[in-house]
Image: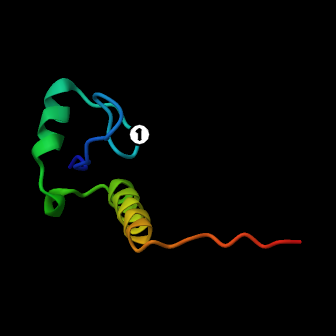
Amino acid sequence: MRRRHIASHTGERMTLCGHSATTQEFKRMKIIKIEEVTCKRCLNILKREEELSASEQKGSRKIVAKA
């Protein structure tokens, strides 16, 4: 059985984890529900992106140490 991927935000006809896809597969990926995704790499990348955006929204600031 083939893995179901998430469509990339940047590339046309690419998955989030970097695999190429046909036009039909890419169209399907854009409308797929997250519950239907079976690619562990795509899910891990999506989770990491969500965590980064959540930490940015909290207003976390980097403190620069002075020497």
Looking at the image, which is closer to me, 66 or 18? 66
Where is residue 13? Give x, y as percent: 28, 29
Residue 12: quadrant of the picture:
top left
Mark 1: few, some, or many residues within 10 Å (few <14, many ≥20)?
some
Tell me if 24 is positioned left or right of 41 in this view: left
Q: Answer above or below: position of 26 versus 6.
A: above
Where is residue 40? Give x, y as percent: 35, 60
Looking at the image, which is closer to me, 11 or 53? 53
For this orientation, the residue located farthest to the top is: 23
Q: Residue at x 43, y 71 (%)?
A: 55
**Which residue type does callout 1 highlight?**
Gly
Where is residue 42? Give x, y as percent: 34, 54
Q: How many numbered discs, if any? A: 1
- According to the image, label 1 marks what residue? 18
Residue 44: quadrant of the picture:
bottom left
Q: Answer above or below: position of 44 versus 59.
A: above
